Image (cartoon, grey):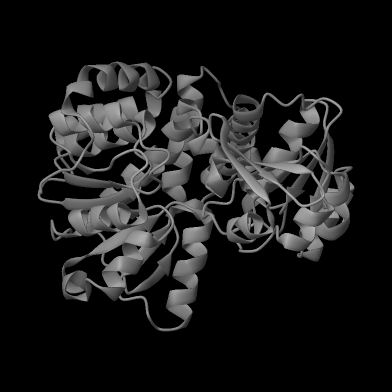
């Protein structure tokens, strides 16, 4: 099928949602004006696996304005906005996404966008690349390159490359300074706590919030939680990150100790089994369990279900309650999936404006660049261009180096 969505009649509502998001996305707006004139993506066929949200729709509009043919599947069925999907189909994007679709439907949607025989990929979590390299290898030679926008996905790509299994060049857009600072730290920090408050109504002031993982995303979550008055505890396996957390004033404990005092536990590691039966048994009544680490493996949901004597579904929207043998009740947000997109609306549009502008410019660069299979970095000038454009849109003016300062910085003799 050219597309698979819930209801085309939702298109009007979706357009309004997209238009509202684009008010906060001036960088993509300026880029789209140039793309409409220059058409740098003419003849390019893109298969994308991304969150089907209003912000992603702004990127889709920009890519199609530049001449691209876009086929879009959802990277997380719980984040799919059906009205946005309908609006995009009416605009000519072939969308394969329905909110809440099951695992089989999710995989079928990935297959659907690959059926278009893409020349470029946009991936979120490396699932599209995984399907391409497993069940759809006959399409591999036709794919010129691709982008990966998540920490977890880049980790998987680097593992594939190390094993000699990666058959195409992939650019790690997640690893740019802009992405780490703006999207990972500020976007994930705000949107994750937004999900906690929307889903549970928890008062974070005075609460003990445990953040598992102190990378770019975890540090953003910890800072926002502390700003709301929470007592923040960090768990880590990396000594440098743990030291960073200590020097920022956080307590660092093993999860086995931190779980005992937690009111909220937020996993953001990119790894599996961060919270297991050992931790569930030690938790207090009412502890909230949240995953902000992409895949639904950080909280051992199967182990939680096995340990529970009762499970109460949807005690609040996006919240399931698990009653353990001792009577304590644990509240799992968004089924252990990515909470900031499933129980909230993900990064603010202003954040995704910069993240998606980096992706659009990197796709344009890939069209005219030949790369060997492997994991590649975004050119530094693309990151800088997006930052300059965003600052200009905000009315921020920078100082400029004088000739004397430039000479001083470029000479070892000065």
Name the residue at the bottom extreme: 164
Foreground residue among 38 and 282: 282
Identity of the residue drawn at 21% across and 51% down: 46
Q: Is residue 169 above or below residue 42?
A: below
Left or right of residue 43: residue 32: right
Question: Can residue 307 be seen by looking at this rendering?
Answer: yes
Identity of the residue drawn at 49% across and 37% down: 341
Residue 105 in the image: state x and y as whole percent.
Answer: 28, 52
Residue 18 in the image: state x and y as whole percent.
Answer: 32, 23
Identity of the residue drawn at 30% across and 57% down: 104
Left or right of residue 255: residue 371: left
Residue 145 in the image: state x and y as whole percent.
Answer: 28, 63
Identity of the residue drawn at 72% across and 32% down: 224
Foreground residue among 41 and 4: 4
Q: How many marks?
A: 0
Q: Is residue 50 above or below residue 391?
A: below
Residue 321 in the image: state x and y as whole percent.
Answer: 64, 40
Question: Can residue 254 be seen by looking at this rendering?
Answer: no
Q: Is residue 398 above or below residue 268?
A: above
């Amino acid at each position: 099928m050219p597309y698979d969505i819930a209801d085309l009649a939702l298109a009007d509502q979706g357009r309004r949602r997209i238009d509202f998001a684009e008010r906060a996305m001036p960088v993509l707006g300026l880029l789209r004006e140039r793309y409409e004139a220059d058409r740098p993506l003419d003849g390019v066929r893109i298969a994308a696996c991304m969150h089907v949200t209003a912000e992603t729709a702004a990127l889709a509009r920009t890519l199609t304005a530049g001449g691209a043919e876009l086929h879009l599947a959802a990277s997380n069925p719980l984040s799919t906005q059906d009205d946005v999907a309908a609006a995009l189909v009416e605009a000519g994007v072939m969308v394969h996404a329905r909110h809440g679709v099951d695992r089989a439907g999710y995989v079928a949607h990935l297959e659907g966008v690959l059926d278009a025989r893409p020349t470029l990929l946009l991936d979120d979590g490396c699932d599209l690349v995984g399907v391409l390299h497993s069940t759809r290898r006959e399409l591999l030679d036709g794919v010129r390159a691709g982008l990966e926008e998540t920490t977890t996905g880049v980790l998987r790509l680097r593992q594939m490359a190390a094993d000699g299994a990666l058959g195409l060049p992939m650019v790690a857009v997640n690893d740019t300074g802009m992405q780490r600072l703006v999207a990972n730290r500020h976007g994930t920090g705000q949107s994750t706590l937004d999900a906690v408050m929307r889903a549970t109504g928890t008062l974070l002031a005075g609460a003990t919030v445990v953040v598992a993982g102190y990378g770019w995303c975890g540090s953003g979550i910890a800072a926002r939680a502390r700003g709301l008055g929470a007592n923040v505890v960090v768990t880590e396996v990396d000594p440098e990150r743990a030291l960073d957390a200590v020097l920022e004033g956080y307590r660092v404990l093993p999860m086995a100790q931190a779980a005992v005092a937690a009111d909220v536990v937020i996993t953001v590691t990119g790894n599996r089994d961060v919270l297991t039966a050992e931790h569930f048994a030690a938790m207090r009544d009412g502890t909230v369990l949240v995953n902000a680490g992409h895949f639904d493996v950080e909280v051992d949901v199967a182990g939680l279900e096995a340990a529970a004597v009762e499970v109460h579904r949807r005690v609040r929207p996006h919240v399931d309650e698990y009653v353990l043998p001792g009577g304590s009740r644990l509240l799992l947000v968004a089924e252990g999936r990515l909470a900031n997109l499933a129980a909230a609306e993900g990064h603010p549009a202003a954040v995704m404006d910069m993240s998606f502008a980096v992706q659009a410019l990197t796709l344009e660069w890939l069209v005219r660049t030949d790369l060997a299979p492997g994991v590649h970095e975004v050119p530094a000038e693309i990151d800088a261009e997006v930052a300059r454009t965003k600052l200009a849109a905000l009315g921020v003016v920078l100082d400029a180096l004088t000739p004397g300062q430039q000479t001083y910085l470029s000479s070892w003799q000065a």
